[in-house]
Image: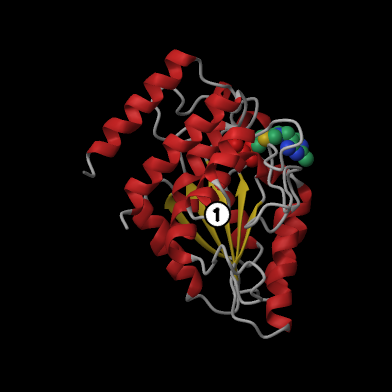
């Protein structure tokens, strides 16, 4: 499978889902898409029919507001019906609510309140070691989310317990809800901070599929300590007028913007045909 082409198809689904539902967090969805595509179509051992398999890999979307990216991928991979998602997303009584919901097949943990995913991922990784299982645990955090103090307790524990079955990503798009991370709460240098806590640190261009994949491989081969992949991404990646703008954190495209976004993504997609 061509993962780059798949990432464009997923971006089209994200734009469509948010436009049709009239809500969603488009900027962070489009920045994290390449990471999720590499994990769900290549790296992770997960099967829609075997989510009770104790050996499945675990995934926690700690930056839960990027749920549309996760749902579009889970639907495409057959975890649930895509039409049901598109028909009911964010509607009254739908289980497809605007943040990850573990009543949905494929979702391991409810997230949305930032700062909680990594602590649970550390627990999952510790449980894997205690039960002598070979599964791996992946968690994705936002760079704005790194202001949450609870993350730093989890980072301390991850290194203390030598959790080499745990890989965290920081979606380092340099924006959070209301401005740049450096304006709201300084986040530099993520690399130095995680390294100081004892993690193996890999810094990559985070919208580059090959770089993401190589980093995940390196993490798998790192022993005695957990790995963090600092993914230097572009918020809104793939749609020119959404890229790098804090205002697009959870703005919904107008009809004209929706059409323009799909046109741009179709042009990119045509390069792979
Ligand atoms: C505990 C908590 N505080 C505040 C929020 C509101 N909130 C939702 S998204 C967001 C910004 C997150 O920025 P970042 O982690 O950088 O995400 P990204 O840029 O990837 O969208 C905030 C403050 C929240 N969801 N949880
Ligand atoms: Mg951010």
Q: Percent position (x, y) of residue 198?
A: 63, 67
Residue positioned 73% across, 55% down in the render: 152
User: Can you say whether 131 is above or below 40 in the image?
Assistant: below
User: Can you say whether 124 is above or below 84 in the image?
Assistant: below
Residue lying furthest bottom in this view?
Answer: 132
If the image is split into quadrants, where does the N terminus sit? bottom left
| Residue 6 in the figure: left or right of residue 170 | left
Residue positioned 64% across, 74% down in the render: 53
Does residue 185 appear in this view? Answer: no
Q: Quadrant of residue 267?
A: top left
Which element is circle 1 on?
helix
Residue positioned 73% across, 64% down in the render: 156
Residue located beneath label 1 in the image: 191
Q: Which colour scheme appears in the figure?
A: secondary structure
Q: Quadrant of residue 159?
A: bottom right
Does residue 215 appear in this view? Answer: yes
If the image is split into quadrants, where does the C terminus sit? top left
**Ligand 2 contact, mark 1 (Cβ < 8 Å):** no
Q: Quadrant of residue 188?
A: top right
**Neighbour class for label 1 at 10 Å: few (<14), some, many (≥20)?**
some
Q: Percent position (x, y) of residue 25?
A: 60, 32
Q: Camera-side residue: 19 or 232?
A: 19
Q: Camera-side residue: 45 or 49?
A: 49
Q: Percent position (x, y) of residue 44?
A: 51, 66
Q: Percent position (x, y) of residue 190?
A: 58, 50
Residue positioned 71% across, 66% down in the render: 122
User: Can you say whether 210 is above or below 135 in the image?
Assistant: above
Count of picture labels? 1
């Amino acid at each position: 499978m061509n993962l780059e082409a798949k990432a464009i198809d997923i971006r089209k689904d994200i734009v469509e889902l948010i436009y049709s539902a009239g809500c969603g967090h488009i900027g962070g969805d489009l920045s994290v898409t390449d990471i999720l595509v590499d994990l769900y179509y290549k790296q992770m051992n997960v099967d829609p029919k075997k989510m009770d398999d104790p050996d499945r890999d675990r995934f926690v979307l700690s930056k839960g507001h990027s749920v549309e990216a996760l749902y579009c991928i889970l639907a495409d991979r057959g975890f649930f019906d895509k039409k049901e998602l598109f028909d009911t997303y964010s509607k009254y009584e739908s289980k497809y609510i605007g943040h990850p919901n573990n009543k949905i097949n494929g979702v391991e943990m409810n997230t949305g309140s930032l700062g909680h995913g990594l602590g649970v991922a550390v627990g999952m990784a510790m449980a894997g070691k205690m039960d002598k299982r070979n599964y791996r645990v992946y968690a994705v955090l936002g760079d704005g989310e790194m202001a949450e103090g609870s993350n730093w307790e989890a980072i301390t524990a991850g290194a203390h317990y030598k959790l080499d079955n745990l890989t965290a990503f920081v979606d380092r798009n340099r924006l959070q809800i209301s401005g740049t991370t450096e304006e709201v709460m300084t986040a530099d240098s993520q690399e130095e901070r995680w390294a100081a806590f004892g993690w193996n640190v890999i810094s990559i261009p985070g919208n580059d599929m090959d770089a993401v994949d190589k980093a995940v491989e390196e993490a798998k081969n790192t022993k005695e300590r957990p790995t963090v992949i600092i993914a230097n991404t572009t918020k809104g990646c793939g749609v020119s007028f959404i890229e790098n703008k804090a205002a697009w954190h959870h703005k919904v495209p107008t009809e004209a913007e929706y059409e323009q976004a799909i046109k741009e993504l179709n042009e990119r997609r045509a390069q792979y045909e």
